[in-house]
Image (cartoon, grey):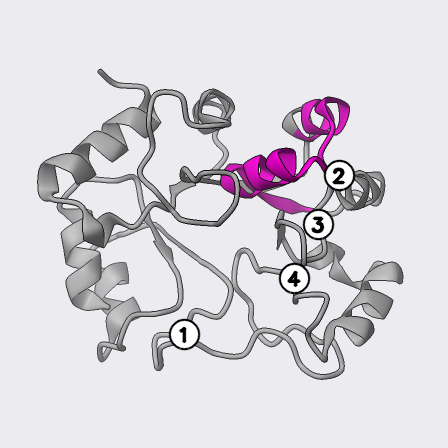
Amino acid sequence: MESAANELLALEPDGLQLTPGNAPTGDFLSSLADRNVMTRTHHGFTPRALRRPVWSSGGDCLTTANSVHPPRTSAPEWPAWEAARSRGAWRRHCLETMYPGYPLGAGEDLDAAMDDRQPLAVDVSHLYMQVHAGCLSGRTLRRLFDYDDVGEVHVSANDGRRDRHQPLAADTFGLAWARERLRSGTPVIVECYMHRLDVDARRRQVDMMRGEP
């Protein structure tokens, strides 16, 4: 965790998203706090392990992360989770927009979530997969881009078929909207696989997100 954080902080970002997958480092969160690093936690992040469970078998949320994925519709906890969501239990959680196979993975479900004033973490690469699959209309996309309860925005590129977390390009779907949200103060996270890029390419990703040449 510490090594990955130090590599990203060298790019002088505004902050870091702490997400599952890195081997733990002792006193990791304290070291970031001592350096005044702004952080947001995502899904099953824990400083003590690679990841932690997010949803219980009864559909309860087991993390206090800033944003979480809903469970797959094939997951054993999904029926209980869906029942709890229908009662409005998840309005206190910022749920990420997903792709087919998940809740919030199609336009009809996004419309229902907005009707219910559900806080959303909008992942534009996931929206692109919905568009590619033909399950997200232009009307719902425009409504989502105007939605007030967007807690954060996630940005990366893909081919429309798989969530590949590719580097941003000038024509990346949703990039212009994400920049508008960034300028308005919404936290925006570049979620491309930075570890696959050299230092110069990483810096270009940060500059591109900020709209710098």
Sequence-wise, the earlier of marks 1 and 4 is 1
Q: Amino acid at mark 4?
A: Pro
Give the residue at x 67% y 58%.
101
Task: Pick the residue in front: 203 or 157.
Answer: 157
- According to the picture, the residue beneath numbered tag 1 turns out to be 46
Question: Marks 1 and 4, Cα distance to the nearest angstrom?
Answer: 18 Å
Assign the magenta stretch its main secondary structure: helix
Quadrant location, the C terminus: top left
Q: Which residue is mark 2?
A: 107
Residue 142 within the magenta-colored segment of the rendering: yes
Q: Secondary structure at mark 2?
A: helix
Which of the two discs, 1 and 3, sits closer to the camera?
Answer: 3
Separation of disc 3 and disc 2 at Cα?
A: 8 Å
Q: Give the residue at mark 3.
A: 104
In the rendered image, residue 130, in percent from the top left (x then y), is placed at 64, 40
* Among numbered discs 4 and 3, the one appearing first in the sequence: 4
Question: Sequence-wise, which precedes: disc 1 or disc 3?
Answer: 1
Q: Which residues, given as a range, are shown in magenta?
A: 119-144
* Residue 18 image point, x, y percent: 37, 60
- Residue 70: which disc? 4
For marks 4 and 2 on the same chain, the one whose residue lies earlier in the sequence: 4
